[in-house]
Amino acid sequence: MAQIFAYIVHKGGAVDDTAAELAVAARKIDASAQVTAIVVGSGSQLDAACQGAAKLYPQVWKFNSDALAYPNAEMIRKLLTKMVPADAIVLIPHDTFGMDLGPGLSIKMDSAYAADVAGIDGVDGNTLKIVRQEFAGMAHAHLAVDISKGAVLTLRPGAFQAEKGAAGAGSVTDKSGEAGDLSAKRRYLETLEAEVGDVDITKADVLVSVGRGIEEQDNIAIAEQLAEAMGAVVSCSRPIVDAKWLEKSRQVGTSGKTVKPKVYLAMGISGSFQHLGGIKGSPFIVAVNKNPKAPIFQIADIGIVEDILEFMPALTEKLSG
Ligand SMILES: Cc1cc2nc3c(=O)[nH]c(=O)nc-3n(C[C@H](O)[C@H](O)[C@H](O)COP(=O)(O)OP(=O)(O)OC[C@H]3O[C@@H](n4cnc5c(N)ncnc54)[C@H](O)[C@@H]3O)c2cc1C
């Protein structure tokens, strides 16, 4: 079986939730694999991230360079192509950076590429069986990937549930001296922090999140009344922001905010991976949707098949009464 490598995303010294998810996915490919975590960056934050990764992986390769302070897919593609055996399996989170890094890496490694992998059914000889979701999660596609010449897989954030208490004590090896040429045509200029807006949904314990099921702008008030009765904050899916019914600062998802509430009420939200990608920390999810086959029900703790325009006022009345 080929060696497995996991590319670790980290920020401010803390590894992203996807680091643990990649470890789970690696075990589904090969339960006995000694998976290597690759952590790139610079300075003390890199050291902290390596320590975080070592709790999840038996071995961690650290690459420390000022050039790697900001993740540059062009540089990291070069680095991985040099360091990783050509027949290796490389796991990367399917976030915007992973979408930039993965395809080109597979071309450079001349290996197979599978994007947005949501499930792994195991390996049969040189065939890796994977699952992807199609039609906004309404259908599952089972695919066979030829891994005889290695593979690059980008894995959907949140699809592989991290095991609690699965921590180990791996070793960190500084491989910075072997990184080779880290020049790139692409240059880092600056980081622009997104505006926080009138409320900071990332700090809320309870979110009442509305999607296209809210139907029209005037109905946002129904969600606001429920949020007030619950001591919650209103957030939303992207179509609501696109329609200018709520500010961008209220959007949950891969191109919006990452939230970590204790309770998440998904009201008329279908459950696209771009939306779910913004919900972290395993909150208790209550989904209300008219369509019993809506993908959100696959991850909800409680699923209610109901019209939100009837459900929300009724709940507000109960809570206020
Ligand atoms: C690059 C990219 C980035 C993206 N980033 C984000 C992101 O950050 N956040 C995000 O949310 N999306 C994002 N999207 C969009 C995403 O793909 C989905 O289109 C979006 O999440 C769908 O929003 P929704 O669930 O509100 O709408 P829909 O998918 O249209 O779902 C509406 C749901 O409401 C239900 N419904 C309708 N009426 C009612 C009713 N009266 N009562 C109860 N249920 C009802 C329907 O059954 C349906 O399930 C992104 C897309 C791309 C391509």
Image: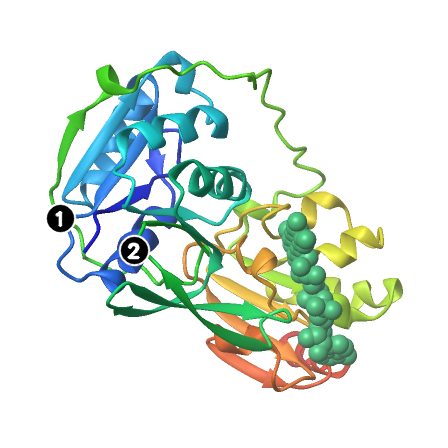
Instruction: Please tell me whether residue 52 is drawn above or below residue 308 in the rendered image.
Output: above
- For numbered disc 2, what is the local secondary structure? loop
Q: Amino acid at mark 1?
A: Gly
- Looking at the image, residue 54 sits to the left or right of residue 194; the answer is left
**Total marks in image:** 2
Q: Are marks 2 and 1 in contact (CB under 8 Å)?
A: no
Res. 38 in view: yes
Structural crowding at the residue carrying mark 1, measured as other residues with C-alpha within 10 Å and reported as few (<14), some (14–19) or many (≥20): few
Secondary structure under badge 1? loop
Q: 204 or 187, which is in the foreground?
A: 187
Residue nearer the viewer, 37 or 220: 37
The residue at 59%/56% (across/down) is 274
Badge number at residue 148: 2
Residue 105 against residue 174 in the figure, above or below: below
Q: Mark 1 or mark 2, which is nearer the start of the sequence? A: 2
Ligand 1 placement by image quarter: bottom right
Badge number at residue 168: 1
- Quick one: 151 or 299, which is closer to the camera? 151
